[in-house]
Amino acid sequence: MSYRISGGSWPRVSKAVRDIPGSLQSATSNVPSGKALMYFGLFLATGVFFVFIAFTTFLPVMVLMPQKFAICFTLGCAFIMASFFALKGPKNQLAHMSSKEVLALAYYAVSYFPGGSAGLSSYLKSSVMRCFGW
């Protein structure tokens, strides 16, 4: 029995091996670069710092200075989200955030609001209408 390597079915087999989901090429294409890891660490540390400051400094005096707590907490959350955008890339992160599984989780959480999703949507609509004076 002889095998013919040149031509024949060999190119199809090698292409099929390259396209296997667990192949080395697909595994290494998702590894972030050193620059992406540096930005991830920097944004994550900054976000954790702002959240820490919000809870340790401004939470005890939130009655007196609620805006300072809100600003620090919001900046911290924004920096933490930015760290994941830096790690995965904006396009991949947005695709992941809008995947079916994530949207299902959001719908599940919304369903526990009073009135469910219909109540929440009517509340948001009336809030927007009042905000713009309609």
Image (cartoon, grey):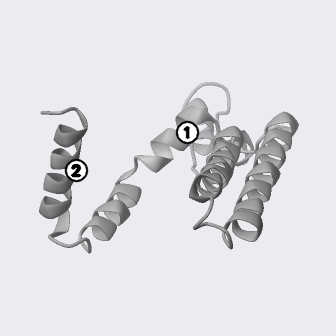
Q: Are marks 2 and 1 in contact (CB under 8 Å)?
A: no
Per the rendering, the mark at residue 37 is none
Residue found at x 19% / y 41%: 130
Q: Quadrant of residue 119?
A: bottom left
Q: Is residue 1 visible?
A: no
Q: What x and y, as percent, mark residue 39? A: 80, 39
Along the line of sight, the residue nearer the viewer: 95 or 105: 105
Residue found at x 86% / y 41%: 38
Along the line of sight, the residue nearer the viewer: 103 or 29: 103
Q: What x and y, as percent, mark residue 23? A: 67, 49
Along the line of sight, the residue nearer the viewer: 12 or 130: 130
Indicate the secondary structure of the residue bearing disc 2.
helix
Q: What x and y, as percent, mark residue 77? A: 62, 53
The residue wearing badge 2 is 124
Closer to the chain start, of discs 2 and 1, is 1
Question: Dot 1: few (<14), some (14–19), or many (≥20) neighbours within 10 Å?
Answer: few
Indicate the secondary structure of the residue bearing disc 1.
helix
Residue found at x 87% / y 39%: 34
Residue found at x 61% / y 63%: 64
Question: Dot 2: few (<14), some (14–19), or many (≥20) neighbours within 10 Å?
Answer: few
Picture quarter with the C terminus: top left
Give how far apart the Cα atoms at labels 2 and 1 are.
29 Å
Q: Quadrant of residue 5?
A: top right
Residue type pointed to by label 1: Asn
Per the rendering, the mark at residue 92 is 1
Q: Quadrant of residue 62?
A: bottom right
Residue type pointed to by label 2: Leu
Tally of numbered tags: 2
Q: Is residue 133 visible?
A: yes
Q: What x and y, as percent, mark residue 8? A: 55, 29
